[in-house]
Image (cartoon, rainbow, N blue to C red):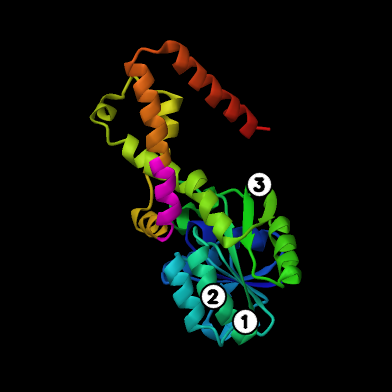
Amino acid sequence: MKIGVVGLGLIGGAVARAMSASGNEVYGFDIDESVIKNAVDDGVICEKLTEDKLCQMQVTVVALYPQITIDYVSKNKDKFAKGSIVVDCSGTKRMVCQALFPIAKEQGFCFIGGHPMAGTEKWGYSSSHLVSFAKATMLLTPDKGQQAQTQILYDLFMNAGFAAVKVTTPSQHDRVIALTSQLAHVVSSAYIKSPVAMEHHGFSAGSFRDMTRVASLNADMWTGLFMENGDYLCDEIDALIERLAEYSAVIRQKDGKKLKAMLEDGKEIAAKLKE
């Protein structure tokens, strides 16, 4: 299958690697020409994805920030082949899908929202080899009546090495991602700002590393994602503040019995999450 990948950063580069390794003919584009050259030299893509080649792609994967994804697809809407599929990889879905579903329908191609649940705290093509999809889920948010195209993407991403492909709605995606991904980055960024953090040497182990790892984030990308999903994310932040206040209150009150019950409750929920 001819696959185009637009944006050869951390995720786009990893997707291109996976698609190429699974036997597809992959073309790639990035604003950095040196990245395109490196991807060709690495055998990740066969050649540069130029605008005149877009019409040859059966599937185009757009791995850009949400607003840039909208801008790119809108600008090139008349270049995608009729009946072809365009899927994005951005971290929020409502804004992108609301903008691109009608454009795709009008132009005769199919747009399906996508989000590979994989990555690292690093970024850029040079780090894309660090991303593994072996335990990752590819989330898809199709429009109505796109069952056949969704099945094509399901097969494509499963063959590329993803552990699972899950279909959801743009709204549910953004609501759940606010907790499972975005809140974790906010908490890590806030946690690391304690003055005591600078004294951690010799006092820290796995828990500290886990809590601080994603604070080494791409600030430009995450600022955009937080702003675009602000309603759901702020609900999660506010709810977490309330729960933390409960813990603070029982500890200050030296209510060990209640604190133990709260910790046991959290332990039980954690166990259920592993089922």
In this view, 160 is above or below 183:
below
Q: Give me the C-alpha separation between circle 1 and circle 2.
A: 8 Å
**Marks 1 and 2 in Cβ contact (< 8 Å):** no
Which residue is label 1 attached to?
A: 105
Q: Which residue is drawn at 31% across and 24% down?
A: 200
Question: x and y percent of residue 198 in the render?
Answer: 26, 29
Of the numbered discs 3 and 1, the one sitting upstream in the chain is 1
Closer to viewer: mark 3 or mark 2: 2
Q: Which residue is drawn at 52% across and 44% down?
A: 180
Which residue is label 3 attached to?
A: 134
Q: In which quarter of the image is residue 207?
A: top left
Which label is found at residue 161?
none
Q: Give me the C-alpha separation between circle 3 and circle 2.
A: 29 Å
Q: Would residue 232 be counted in the magenta stretch? A: yes
Q: What element carries label 2?
A: helix
Nearer to us in this view, 173 or 210: 173
Q: Give me the C-alpha separation between circle 3 and circle 1.
A: 33 Å
